[in-house]
Structure formats: structure tokens, C-alpha cells
């Protein structure tokens, strides 16, 4: 349940600072949402409408204040094949089902599985996102020309030098206003936001997906919906963890899962694509003072306000100004400390982090990168724990210490040599821990080997006491 007083405090702190931070996130959202819309094969308005709806809903029901959620690239990559094969209406249906999945995941407390994602994987996730954010700007940068490079450089100068003059207005907002006015006044011809695609012309309306409801629909959208739910939830929870670390405050991951599910259901019913947490925009929001729910609400509300009420003005913002903002976001997102710590960090941890980055960047698939990283972490951890197992022989007694499980079972079995004994033996398991059926099978295998050589076996310490004594068979 939501505790009323803490929840209300998340809305009340420093409203002007929250709104301005949300405005920065809005301008950081515009180019990415439009770009991701093209990736998914949908009209930019679909992505922008979704971002508005998701932000409003997640601000109210989410579990991580100050986090920005919207139409995201990871989801766009998942749904692109569905849109190509079946059309945008099936996208809305899949998003609706994905939202329901996420609500169920939240009530089932599946967010607890995040504890199995190691710090190395999380760092790799963040660094990969920073690289992908910058890579998404490369087409704009490479085609900018000399004048465009100058505008981007001017934007970066304003962003990084502006705080020396004032911190009351976020530097990225100053960047957008100054560069838009400068390009208009000097007649500088550069690509503008209006050139990126059709912008919304009004408020989103309720739209039930126009699809043939039934088992055939379910067979088409089930797998994509599950992928949307898993990828979106993974990225949102990872982003929430980043905000937890940056702000030193906890979040309710289960509430975030439920809130994201509600947001995606709402977005799908208002003609929008499903979305999730966006780490670059979230980092930007937090950097400029966003700490509560109002900044999330402002990011979505201002996005629609700018697009609808001031669409002509926003359409004149040079893309180069937004590119400068996104370069700043990518720089701030990258964990530079992780690079400095490479020599001090264990090699296997570095390998996990770098592999997570490499797989994510090459595949543009966040879930695949994290999955590979988690699997590597699990394998390396199992190997470390298995290496700690010891079987020490003292006469006809074997003393077993450490963890006995699937990864250490073979080494355990190989430590016993029945041909080297003439009388009964004792296997002392008091200092060992048997974790799985493979461990139990390994103990039984050793016992059977001794029996095959007509050697009696006493198992001591199984479940805390001597449990079996086998005479010569």
C-alpha cells in the first residue's frame, strides 16, 4: 500500500526546480522518441503520444520518483517485426497485453530477481546505454556540415559553461532557446525538429485496438508482448537502480513494475507504443534537480504541451541543439569511474562488464547484453565456489568441506579412490553443504563405488548427523 505522507512529500519538494528539470528531460526525449518511432516503423506521433501518457501514469503509480519513462529504443527493437508483419493495431494489442504481464509481475514480486544482476552487469548496462545514446546521434553529427558542427559545439559550450553564470535555469534549456533564436536571427539553415517527422496535432484520444479478438490474435501477439514486458521491465528496474545510487534513496521495484504495466496499458489504449524507463533522460532529470514525481509529470506534460500548443515553435528548434543535449546525456550516463577502476577490479568482473557492453552495443539488444552478463556472472561465481571445496583424507576417513553442487560434483567424486582401501571408510560431510540433487547423486555415486569394491561406507554429517552405514556387500 502507498503510505500517504511519504507519497505526498514526493510531490511537494521544490516544485519549480522539479518542473525545470522535467523540461530538460522533455527536450532530451524529443529526438530519441522520434528516432525510436522510426525504428519501430510507426509515425512519430505514436511515440510522442505514448511518452505523454506513460509519463503521466508512471508519475502517479510508479515506485521510483524522478525516473523518466517513455517510448524507448529497446521496446522499438522488439516490436519492429510485429509492426512490419501485422501493422500498428497489433502493436497496440501487444502493448496492452505486455502491460498486463507487467502488472502481474509486480504483484508476483518478480522484481526481486534483480538481486541476481551483479554490479558488473549493471555497470556494463549503463556504459552500453551511454554508447548507444551517442551512436544514435552519429547520423546527425556526420551530416551536420561545418555550420552544424559549429552549432553543436556552441550548444556544448552553453551546456557546460552555463552553470558558471546561473544554476537557476538548466543549461540545456538555455542551449535550446539561444540556439533556436540564433539560427532564426542569422537565417542559418539546418535540419529542425519539424523535419524529423509529423508532430502531434492534438490530445490523444481513446483507441481500442482494431484487431480480431480471439485465440488467433493471442497466438500472434503473445511472444512479442512477453518480450516487451521483460525487456521494458528489465530496463526500468536497471534505471531505477541507477537513480537509487545517484540519489542515495530507495525505490519500490514492485510498485514500479505495476506502474509501468498500468502506463503501458494506458498508452496502448490511447494509440501509443509501449515504453519503459529511459536512463539517459532520467540521468539528465536527476542531474538538474529532479527528485520527486512532479519532474516525471512535467516531462510528459510539457512534451505534449510543447508539441501541440507550441508545435510550430518547437518545430523550429535545430536538431543540432538536441544533439548537443544528447551528447551531454551520453557523457553523464557513462560510468567513467568504472574505466579508472579496471586495473583494480578483478579480471573476471571486468570481463563480465566489457562483454555486457560489447553484446549490447553490437546487438542493440539490452536484454541480450544483460542476459549474457548474468550468465557469465553465474558461471564465474559457480566456478569460484566450486574451487573452495576440499576433500581431505586422514587414514580411512575423508573430511569434506565447502559447497557441493552441480559445479563441484565431479571434483568431489574424483577425490575418492576405492582401490586404495582395504577396510571400511568414513566420509565426514559435517563441514559440507549439499545444495542440489546433483550433490546428493554425487554422494550416492561415491558410496556405490566403494560398495562395488566391497568396502563399507559410513556417511557422517548428512543432514547434521550420521545417516547411513553400509557393511561389506
Image (cartoon, rainbow, N blue to C red):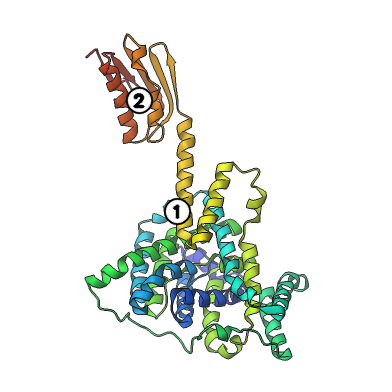
Q: Residue at the far right: name it.
A: 165
In the image shown, does 94 or 114 lie closer to the viewer?
94
Vertical side of 453 occupied by 341: above or below: below
Count residues near mark 1 (Cα–Cα under 10 Å), then give few for <14, some for 14-19, many for 20+: some
Report, in whole angstroms, how far the alpha carbon at label 2 lies from the one at label 1.
Answer: 37 Å
Mark 2 crowdedness (10 Å alpha carbons): few <14, some 14-19, many ≥20? few
Q: Secondary structure at mark 1?
A: helix
Q: Which residue is mark 2?
A: 464
* Element marked by disc 2: loop
Res 357 → quadrant: bottom right
Q: Which mark is residue 138?
A: none
Viewer-nearest residue: 197 or 338: 197
**Residue 443 x/y as whole percent:** 32, 26
Q: Please state if 356 lies on the left or on the right of 221 as rendered.
A: right
Q: Is residue 456 left or right of residue 75?
A: left
The residue that mark 1 highlights is 371
Q: Quadrant of residue 102?
A: bottom left
* Farthest top residue in view: 422
Report the quarter where the C terminus lies. Answer: top left
Q: Earlier in the sequence, mark 2 or mark 1?
A: 1
Q: Position of residue 201 (x, y in %)?
A: 48, 89
Residue 214: image location, x then y, percent: 22, 73
Mark closer to the observer (2, 1): 1
Q: Is residue 79 left or right of residue 137?
A: left
Q: Position of residue 166 (x, y in %)?
A: 75, 73
Amino acid at each position: 500500500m502507498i503510505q500517504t505522507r511519504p507519497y505526498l512529500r514526493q510531490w511537494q519538494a521544490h516544485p519549480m526546480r522539479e518542473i525545470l528539470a522535467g523540461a530538460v528531460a522533455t527536450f532530451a526525449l524529443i529526438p530519441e522518441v522520434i528516432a525510436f518511432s522510426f525504428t519501430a516503423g510507426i509515425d512519430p506521433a505514436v511515440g510522442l503520444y505514448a511518452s505523454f501518457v506513460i509519463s503521466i501514469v508512471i508519475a502517479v503509480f510508479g515506485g521510483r520518483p524522478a525516473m523518466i519513462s517513455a517510448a524507448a529504443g529497446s521496446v522499438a527493437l522488439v516490436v519492429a517485426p510485429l509492426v512490419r508483419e501485422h501493422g500498428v493495431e497489433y502493436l497496440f494489442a501487444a502493448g496492452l497485453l505486455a502491460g498486463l504481464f507487467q502488472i502481474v509481475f509486480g504483484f508476483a514480486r518478480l522484481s526481486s530477481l534483480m538481486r541476481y544482476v551483479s554490479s558488473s552487469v549493471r555497470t556494463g548496462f549503463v556504459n552500453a546505454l551511454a554508447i548507444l545514446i551517442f551512436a544514435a546521434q552519429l547520423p546527425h553529427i556526420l551530416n551536420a556540415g561545418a555550420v552544424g558542427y559549429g552549432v553543436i559545439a556552441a550548444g556544448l559550450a552553453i551546456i557546460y559553461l552555463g552553470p558558471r553564470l546561473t544554476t537557476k535555469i538548466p543549461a540545456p534549456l538555455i542551449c535550446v532557446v539561444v540556439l533556436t533564436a540564433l539560427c532564426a536571427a542569422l537565417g542559418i539553415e539546418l535540419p529542425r525538429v519539424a523535419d524529423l517527422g509529423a508532430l502531434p496535432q492534438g490530445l490523444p484520444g481513446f483507441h481500442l485496438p482494431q484487431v480480431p479478438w480471439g485465440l488467433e490474435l493471442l497466438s500472434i501477439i503473445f511472444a512479442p508482448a512477453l518480450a516487451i514486458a521483460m525487456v521494458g521491465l528489465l530496463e526500468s528496474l536497471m534505471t531505477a537502480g541507477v537513480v537509487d545510487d545517484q540519489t542515495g534513496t530507495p525505490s519500490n521495484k514492485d510498485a514500479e513494475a505495476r506502474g509501468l504495466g498500468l502506463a503501458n496499458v494506458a498508452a496502448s489504449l490511447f494509440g501509443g507504443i509501449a515504453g519503459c524507463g529511459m536512463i539517459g533522460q532520467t540521468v539528465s532529470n536527476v542531474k538538474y534537480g529532479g527528485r520527486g514525481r512532479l519532474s516525471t509529470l512535467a516531462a510528459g506534460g510539457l512534451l505534449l504541451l510543447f508539441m501541440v500548443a507550441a508545435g510550430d515553435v518547437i518545430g523550429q528548434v535545430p536538431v543540432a541543439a538536441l544533439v548537443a543535449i544528447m551528447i551531454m546525456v551520453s557523457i553523464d550516463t557513462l560510468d567513467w569511474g568504472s574505466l579508472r577502476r579496471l586495473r583494480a577490479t578483478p579480471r573476471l568482473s571486468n570481463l563480465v562488464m566489457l562483454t555486457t557492453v560489447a553484446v549490447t552495443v553490437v546487438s542493440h539488444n539490452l536484454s541480450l547484453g544483460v542476459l549474457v552478463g548474468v550468465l557469465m556472472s553465474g558461471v564465474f561465481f559457480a566456478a569460484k565456489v566450486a574451487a573452495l571445496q576440499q576433500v581431505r583424507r586422514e587414514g580411512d576417513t575423508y573430511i569434506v568441506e565447502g559447497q557441493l553442487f552441480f559445479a563441484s560434483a565431479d571434483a568431489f567424486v574424483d577425490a575418492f579412490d576405492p582401490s586404495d582401501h582395504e577396510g571400511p571408510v568414513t566420509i565426514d560431510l559435517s563441514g559440507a553443504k549439499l545444495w542440489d540433487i546433483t550433490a546428493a547423486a554425487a554422494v550416492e555415486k561415491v558410496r556405490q563405488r566403494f560398495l562395488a569394491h566391497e568396502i563399507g561406507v559410513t556417511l557422517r554429517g548428512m543432514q547434521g548427523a550420521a545417516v547411513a552405514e553400509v557393511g561389506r556387500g
